[in-house]
Image (tube, rainbow, N blue to C red):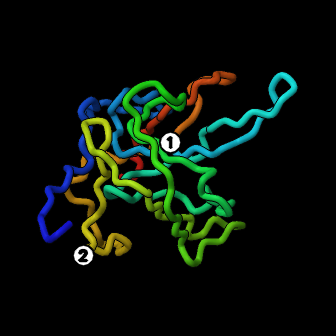
Amino acid sequence: MNGEKREVEACGLSTTLSFSARVYAGESASRGAWPWMAMIVKKRYSFVNGEWIQQWSHHCGGSIISERTILSAAHCFDDMSDLKNYRIFLGKWEARLGLGNEQEFEIGEVIKHAEFTTHTFKNDIALIRLRAPIRFSEEVRPVCLPDPTNDITDESYILSGVASCFVLGWGHMEIDVSVILCKYLDLTDSFI
């Protein structure tokens, strides 16, 4: 970067989401509501009409934490023999590919927690290094991370200023529906 300073994109901002709504059973997300959500897809082969076809299908989710790094779960990368079998899509709110302004990325490296255990999922965390930098926009932004100087594992730690807590993921909104959507669940009052 030749010593030049760069402006960091604002984290945790959504141009479409109203944080006043309360959701208990999960809701379908709207376009741009969760701009830090990443979709991880994996190459799969299906036997269709007498022949094998290759297609990308939803595999896992993640969160953008910097212009080249996605935070995800280590179990999502059980087969790391060929990272070309994975892709990252950003700017999506529905799993079907080719619907809008999504960005596609190849994975350069996956760094799993050194003590990740598959049978218990202990330390189930991984960093994904992208081959190219992310182009931030209103629909693609990083998530906010806690201040590294605060010990959030300390029982006395108080989440000051936190208005909401949400869980995001990809899933079906109804049984036997072929459309996979980004979903969220408000856990704001679950910790009180």
Amino acid type assigned to the residue bearing label 1 in the image: Gly
Q: Would you say 46 lies left or right of 102 here? A: right
Q: In the image, what residue occupies the spot 68% across and 63% down? A: 81
Screen quadrant of the N terminus = bottom left
Mark 2 touches mark 1? (CB < 8 Å)? no
Give the percent coordinates (x, y) of residue 161.
Answer: 19, 54
Label 1 packing within 10 angstroms: few (<14), some (14-19), many (20+):
some
Give coordinates of residue 107: x percent, y percent.
50, 56
Q: Residue furthest right?
A: 50
Q: Residue furthest front?
A: 2
Residue at screen point 44% across, 39% down: 185
Q: Residue 36: horizontal and vertical position, in percent? A: 36, 46
| Label 2 or label 1, whichever comes before in sequence order | 2
Task: Describe residue 129's horizontal placement relative to residue 95 as left or right.
Answer: left
Count neighbours of disc 2 (C-alpha within 10 A) and say few if under 14, some if 14 to 19, many if 20 or more: few
Q: Which residue is mark 2?
A: 149
104 left or right, relative to 157: right
Task: Judge by depth and name the residue closer to the eye, 3 or 95.
Answer: 3
Nearer to me, 100 or 34? 100
Rendering coords of residue 100 (x, y %): 40, 26
* Mark 2–mark 1 distance (CA, rounded to whole Å): 28 Å
With 146 as the anchor, is 98 left or right in this view?
A: right
Image point (71%, 37%), residue name: 54
For the point 44% across and 37% down, the residue is 184
* Local secondary structure at mark 2: loop
Residue holding disc 1: 169
